[in-house]
Image (cartoon, rainbow, N blue to C red):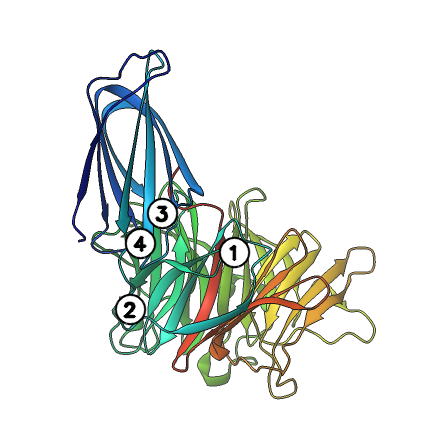
Amino acid sequence: MKPLLLFTLGACAPDGDSLGDALDLVVAANERVGSVVELGVTTEEPTTLEVLWGVGERRDHSLVVANAATSHQLHLYGLPYGVGAGVSVTATAADGTTSAGAATLETGHLPSNFPGFSTGGAVTAWSDGYALLNTAGSANYAFILDGEGRVVWAWEVELGPQEQLMRALLGNDGETMYLLVAGRSAEAAPKSRVLQVPLHGGSETSLSWPWLDHDIVDLDEGTLGGIVRVQQGELWGDAVVERNAAGEFRTAYSTWDDPQLGDPVANSPENTWTHMESLDWDADAGLFTFQTYLTDQFVRVRRSDGEPVLHLYGEGSDYTPAEGETPLHVAHQFEVLSPTRFLHFENGGTERSASRAVEFEIDDATHTYREVWSHTSDPPLYVYIKGDVRRFADGTTQVIWATAGRIEDVNAAGEVDWWLQLDLGAVFTYVQHIEQLGAN
């Protein structure tokens, strides 16, 4: 941990009264996550706080603490690694008198084995937010970028043989990071787990979840949803399974109970029938949505009773391609843009070796679907596994070219506003966009 800086500053108020004799600030870079600032504020009377912080002289991050106390212990997020930073605090007592103080520090440096990368252009669509990603390959990290493309949080994950870091997910509380570690062999898969990590650093908690694979979502009150591989005989299918805070499991949906997914025996190369690759949770609609490889199906399911409300693409689809349309083929992550529009990362295959981002619209009147937008990188990239897409309010689409180690922000005119390229040896999986870090 970097040396603590202790500041005792005189308090002042517009009418000349003072708030006690002093305001004490203690600031330090977190020992485990060097970009996180630990802030302690002590006053002689109970106070609320307004905290401002940023790089150098900037104070572009803020936090209001409405609970009055004489001692506050806070974590401040959003600073890049290896920079000089400043923190300003204003404390207010019940009678309105105030005390102000300031402190400076240097944030810690990124670990030496963190994957290198280069960037170009400028972020516009999510410049006020953050992007959570994770890498696989030579180094396995969950990390967060700010709207200037700088790393502001990073956590290395130690993996065993035949294990992969599939997904990093910041929980609904804004304070808990979930890291999905999935086994990719008959020996490792029963040991699949979710690592629960405090955003401010600290110790990992391992949540056992046998046969968990690919993706998880945060539901409510400590309950997670995840994709679990399920075997019947020699064939493998999938289920959407919930794990509550007590470690109890509930199957919300199983592909084995869904007749619209086709004949398992006729569609099972290498004993795999369905192979879910992505999972989404729509809290407002109460729907799980997932994509399956091999059957090329996109399915929406009610959480309450496990009943499907939509099958799209592939065998058993509720909608057929409009005349001249090319069906979706081998897709990973997606985004539900509306009840009738869906954005996908399409890996492609032998007949379409260039991967792309593609948007489809369904027509309830004709029960058809058609392509309404697509983007292929220049030069074309083939991403054989993983991949993700996100659409922003200004029409920009972010494309995660996973195994190519590349991110592109493509504006509504089809131009790349910003890009990031990982150095050789590391690849991406998926992305989560976040408006703010921390609970406040």
User: Residue type at mark 4?
Assistant: Ser
Asked if the residue at tag 3 contacts the one at tag 4, i.e. Cβ–Cβ closer than 8 Å, the answer is yes
Viewer-nearest of discs 2 and 4: 4
SS at badge 4:
loop
Find the residue positioned furthest to the front.
Answer: 16
Viewer-nearest of discs 2 and 1: 1
Mark 2 / mark 1, whichever is N-terminal: 2
Mark 3 / mark 1, whichever is N-terminal: 3
Label 2: which residue? Answer: 190
User: Residue type at mark 3?
Assistant: Tyr
> Eyeballing the image, is 253 above or below 164?
above
Viewer-nearest of discs 4 and 1: 4
User: Residue type at mark 1?
Assistant: Asp
Asked if the residue at tag 1 contacts the one at tag 4, i.e. Cβ–Cβ closer than 8 Å, the answer is no
Q: CA distance from mark 3 to mark 1?
A: 27 Å
- Badge 1 crowding class, 10 Å Cα cut-off, few under 14, some 14 to 19, many 20 or more, is many
> Eyeballing the image, is 290 above or below 435?
below
- Badge 3 crowding class, 10 Å Cα cut-off, few under 14, some 14 to 19, many 20 or more, is many
Q: Position of residue 286 (x, y in %)?
A: 55, 45
Work out whether residue 1 or residue 24 is closer to the camera in this orientation and state it: 24
Work out whether residue 41 or residue 86 is closer to the camera in this orientation and state it: 86
Q: Position of residue 332 (x, y in %)?
A: 54, 70
Residue 180 seen by the camera: yes
Q: CA distance from mark 4 to mark 3?
A: 7 Å
Label 1: which residue? Answer: 280
Q: CA distance from mark 2 to mark 3?
A: 35 Å
Label 3: which residue? Answer: 77
Residue depicted at 29% across the width and 68% down the height: 190
Label 4: which residue? Answer: 35
